[in-house]
Amino acid sequence: MNGLCTACKKPVEVLDFRLGEGIVVVRCTACGKQQRLALSEASGPEAPAPGPQPAAPLAVTAQPPAPSPAPAPSGQAIEPLFEPPSGFCRKCVAPRVPGAKSCPSCGLVFANAPATRLQPSAGLMAAYRALAARWGDAKEHLRFLHFAQASGELAMAGRLYRIRLAQSPSDAVARSSLEATVKMASAPVNVATIRNTKEPEAVPGRRKKYIMVAITLLGPSLLFALFRFFGGGH
């Protein structure tokens, strides 16, 4: 880092270098004046090279900047897989029995399992790839499950989590998310769906129709009853 004293134009020595603030504290070797300069003022291609620096100031400037904080868990990423590793059933992702022609868990006949029927939709694949980039974020998993539920692919979402567990059995995030998938799939009523469901057609129009039908059906009976009542009174 090069610099000149603003008073006598002599080379200065660096006393302190604050990286985060962009400030350099220097002292003139000739007149002893100390200055606080911006980084752009203390360095430049036109400034002369500084002379030999004392050991102590050099030790200060040679210190590395403070390490960056560790990335948050939400930044954790994984490699998204859409097919189980070898040795697992392609449908239910259960371990395959050596030599068996079908899966003992789901009954899938391995020779009759077309790959296209076991693939998620393009939308779910895109959502899972986005989730894989932020695997440690619990909110992202909940958003993914709601998307899978809305698109009718909650079972496929569970399959993707089982593929992840087959790939990495110690993944606690995949295990807890799979449990959440099972709970959502086994829930008898989806409250969110009920709240968002609109009533069929406009109610006022239907009420008028029902009233007219009731008058048509009950009108003659009502008139006959009134006639009998008043006729009997006479």
Image (cartoon, rainbow, N blue to C red):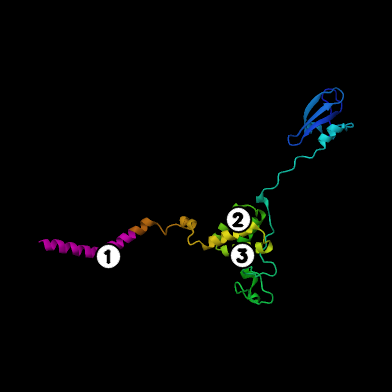
For marks 1 and 2, give the one nearer the viewer. 2
Q: Above or below — where is 90 with respect to 74?
A: below
The picture places residue 218, in percent across and down from the top left corner, at 25, 64
| Numbered disc 1: secondary structure | helix
Residue at which label 3 appears = 159
Do the numbered discs 1 and 2 sit on residues whose CB atoms are within 8 Å? Answer: no
For residue 141, the mark is: 2
Q: Can residue 166 be seen in this view?
A: yes
Which tag, 3 or 1, sits closer to the chain's start? 3
Along the viewing direction, whichever of 48 and 107 lies nearer the viewer = 107
Q: Above or below — where is 173 with respect to 116?
A: above
Crowd rating for badge 2 (residues with CA inside 10 Å; few <14, some 14–19, many 20+): many
Q: In which quarter of the image is the N terminus?
A: top right
- Stretch of the chain drawn in magenta: 208-234
Q: Is residue 219 magenta?
A: yes
| Numbered disc 3: secondary structure | helix
Crowd rating for badge 1 (residues with CA inside 10 Å; few <14, some 14–19, many 20+): few
Picture quadrant of residue 147: bottom right
- Amino acid marked by disc 3: Arg
Q: Does the magenta stretch include residue 11?
A: no
Picture quadrant of residue 57: top right
Residue at which label 1 appears = 217
Picture quadrant of residue 111: bottom right
Crowd rating for badge 3 (residues with CA inside 10 Å; few <14, some 14–19, many 20+): many
The picture places residue 172, in percent across and down from the top left corner, at 64, 57
* Horizontal arrangement in the rendering, residue 54 relative to residue 158 (left or right): right
Q: Quadrant of the C terminus?
A: bottom left
- Amino acid marked by disc 1: Leu
Which tag, 2 or 3, sits closer to the chain's start? 2
The picture places residue 80, in percent across and down from the top left corner, at 67, 60
Q: Can residue 153 be seen in this view?
A: no
- Amino acid marked by disc 2: His
